Image (cartoon, helix red, strand yellow):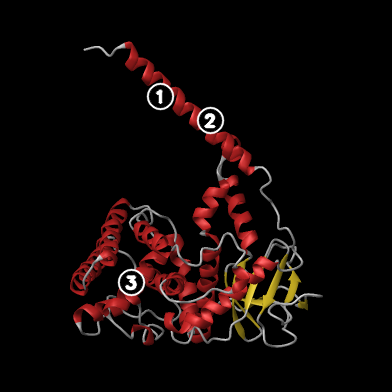
Amino acid sequence: MRPGKGCGRRLLWGVVGLVGLCVLATAVSALSNIGLPDHSEQVDYLSENQKALLAEYFQVRAALGEQVWPGWGTLDSPVVVYNEAAAFLVNYEAANPPDGWLKVPQMAARGGPWQPVPDDDFAGQPYYRQTLPATGETPQAFTVVVGEQWAASMTTKEWTAIGLRQTIRDDLPPPLAAIFPYRLVGRFLLRGSDGYISLLAHESFHAFQGAVAPDKFAAAERAKAVEATYPWENAGLQAAWQAELDVLAAALKAETTAETAVLVTQFLAQRQQRRQDADLTDAQIDFERQREWLEGLARYVELEIWRQASYSDYQPHPLLADDGDFDGYAGFPTRWSQEVDQIGRMADDVGDGRFYYTGMAQAVLLDRLLPGWKETIFEEGVFLEDLLATAVSGQPVSLFPQMPDDT
């Protein structure tokens, strides 16, 4: 039976409508890109919004940090934030900070003298700045040492958004770069002010790791040298990783402790079999474990501080009352769902990004299965998978022998 003319017209107008919507969406996206800044509004001072974000970070960490990780909430740790031209040092106790910062773990000196920012303050106290070197060196988004204090290091929120847009634009062909919905994608990837504050917590935990366990921290950073030799694109290894990640995500979704323990046992068995089948070297296995300890734990803290703030009666800093990009941590359930879903999409990812997720997931599972695990994880030779094996077996178990310090 042949379709009638009416059906054909409806189909035609449906196509025309779809094309029209696409054209309209393209035009709206292109218009929304007009006026997007390509540089910070001010580079010599911290903006009032940046100060509000920092004030909230310090407040939420003081209020909930000890519940997230014992010792982290009370650590006296400064913060370095930077834009395209200058770095700023806040919450530093000494009146005259020593020059520059130390890049870790090499402890290589970088930067120049810190100068008090004139006619301005942070929370009633002076803060400091320095012009970034012409060589392009920055403190990076990680942790640095200033004097004898480990400090969290992070781009300003404004420069973070600009940098993300620039990175995306540079990877797109010119016609697509002009119409790409940077605002929408940026909002999704950066997760607003809530996400920025949690990223400050992430980098702050790196400072905590370095201050509390400097040798283990240094070993975890040195392990990254193996990244170039890791067989990321081996199809068989990718398939085995996919099976492992799927079990790990399922364990996070389990509704009972018994079901969680069964799935964790499967995860550990799958992990051991994957390494054996892929004939990974000792150094490559150690790379996995070390990066899970370093980045996975920081990711765990990043999410846990958000969760604690979301499900408690915590009241954010009043300075953020006028921040339209701040959601008061109400978006945690969506963020958590996205994190769990992303675990299953990391099997073919190249680089250590998957270990942010696998380390974080193991930490969450340890919260359920082995209370008190945080007292042990900073000890030499102890890694997340070892504690999970202990949790499900009742006996201390190591899935891999301890590596020498100079690995």
Distance between mark 2 and mark 1 Cα atoms: 14 Å
Residue 122 drawn at (x, y percent): 70, 77
Q: Are marks 2 and 1 in contact (CB under 8 Å)?
A: no
Q: Provide the residue designation for mark 3.
A: 362
Residue 300 drawn at (x, y percent): 42, 72
Dot 2 crowding, Cα within 10 Å, few <14, some 14–19, many 20+: few
Q: Residue furthest right?
A: 118
Q: Provide the residue designation for mark 2.
A: 23
Tag 2: residue type?
Val
Q: Secondary structure at mark 2?
A: helix
Dot 1 crowding, Cα within 10 Å, few <14, some 14–19, many 20+: few
Q: Quadrant of the N terminus?
A: top left
Distance between mark 3 and mark 1 Cα atoms: 49 Å
The residue lying at 33 percent from left, 56 percent from top is 344
- Nearer mark to the viewer, of 3 and 2: 2
Left or right for 155, reference 86: left
Left or right for 407, reference 100: left
The correct choice, above or below, for 311 with respect to 324 in the image is below
Q: Provide the residue designation for mark 1.
A: 14
Q: Give the mark nearer the N terminus: 3 vs 1.
A: 1
Dot 3 crowding, Cα within 10 Å, few <14, some 14–19, many 20+: many
Q: Give the mark nearer the N terminus: 3 vs 2.
A: 2
The residue lying at 41 percent from left, 75 percent from top is 293
Residue 53 drawn at (x, y percent): 60, 70
Q: Quadrant of the C terminus?
A: bottom left
Q: Secondary structure at mark 1?
A: helix
The correct choice, above or below, for 303 with respect to 243 in the image is below
Task: Please tell me which residue lies in front, 230 or 393.
Answer: 393
